[in-house]
Amino acid sequence: MSPNSPPPSDDVPRRNKARRRVAVVVVLSALVVIAVGLTLIISLRPGGSSSPATQGASPAPTTASSSATPTPSPPSTAPSPPGTAPSPSGTIPDTGPVPVPPPEPEPTGPGASTAPPTPTAIPGLLLGQDVTSIPGAGNRIALTFDGGANAAGLQAILSTLEQKQVSATFFLTGTWAAANPDGVARIVAAGHRLGNHSMTHPAFTQLTDPMIADEIVRAESAIVAAGGAPRPFFRFPFGDRDTQTINDVNNLGYIAVRWSVDSLGWKGTSGGMTRDAVTQRVLDALQPGGIVLMHIGSNPDDGSTLDADALPGLIEGIRSAGYGFVTLDALLAG
């Protein structure tokens, strides 16, 4: 068979089959290449499918969820830890603890108030003293009345002071003020001055400093509740005091006020006193700027009210001796 002779008839099918196989292989190879290429292109495009390392992250919100109004979380109601101050929303600020001043120490004792009163400015010359006279008052004296027992002589005293046009100073205990709020109101309405005489009338040198503060603060609260204002005058019960107790009183903003003469009317007739004896005792002790001590209540044994009884004649005797009258506010003028 020459080279140009046609192939035998049985070789044609075999060649056609071979060509088809080659074509299939080429097509498949091209499809594989195209598929690989498309995969690489998609994986490298921005916004394409995330890699396995980032899968599992929260999906972006849908349109419905993103348009809904979020519900705000309620503010924390838990108490602030010690040494921190809450922010306006009620939560602790992220900037760290904010120092908070420590609470004021509370006075001890039953019914103690929560804080001492704000100190009042006291003239320097009166600090450390239990004042027995009014400096610079000249021929004027101060009539003072202590109220701690009962109010038996109050009406007579107020009537006499009104008739004689004399102003006085009344030192009240807290228990007296609480028991006689109408009495406090009448004293104030008549234009008289008030002072603090402690809550329960104890001997101050037998008390601790916190107990002293408690007595003074509670008495002030009771007097104020009854409509009075005792500041800045304080009188020691029984006149019992020492350097420390005077300092305690000053530190609470009060001036300690004693007396230059005690009428001794509180002794009553059972104690050997009379109305005339009360009057004469005071007149014999008159001095410029003097402070006279008398009492509102009656003697517990005989029920006498010698100070109230002696007051009309006493005022006339003081004026006859060339003296006038003043309240303890004159102490603040110096």
Image (cartoon, rainbow, N blue to C red):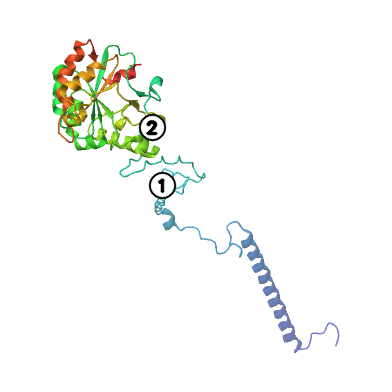
| Disc 1 packing (10 Å; few <14; some 14–19; many ≥20) | some
Residue 62 or residue 48, whichever sits in front: 62
Residue in the foreground of this view, choosing between 174 and 297 = 297
Element type where label 2 sits in the image: helix
**Residue type at numbered disc 1:** Gly
From this view, report whether residue 58 is shown above or below residue 121. Answer: below
Which residue is rendered at x = 36% and y = 38% of the image?
206
The residue sitting at 55% across, 64% down in the picture is 56
Q: Which residue position holds label 2?
A: 245
In the rendered image, residue 232, in percent from the top left (x then y), is placed at: 32, 26
- The quarter of the picture where residue 300 lies is top left
Q: Which mark is residue 90?
A: 1
273 or 250, which is in the foreground? Answer: 273
17 sits left or right of 131 in the view: right
Mark 1 touching mark 2, by CB under 8 A? Answer: no
Residue at 34% across, 38% down: 214
Q: Quadrant of residue 134?
A: top left
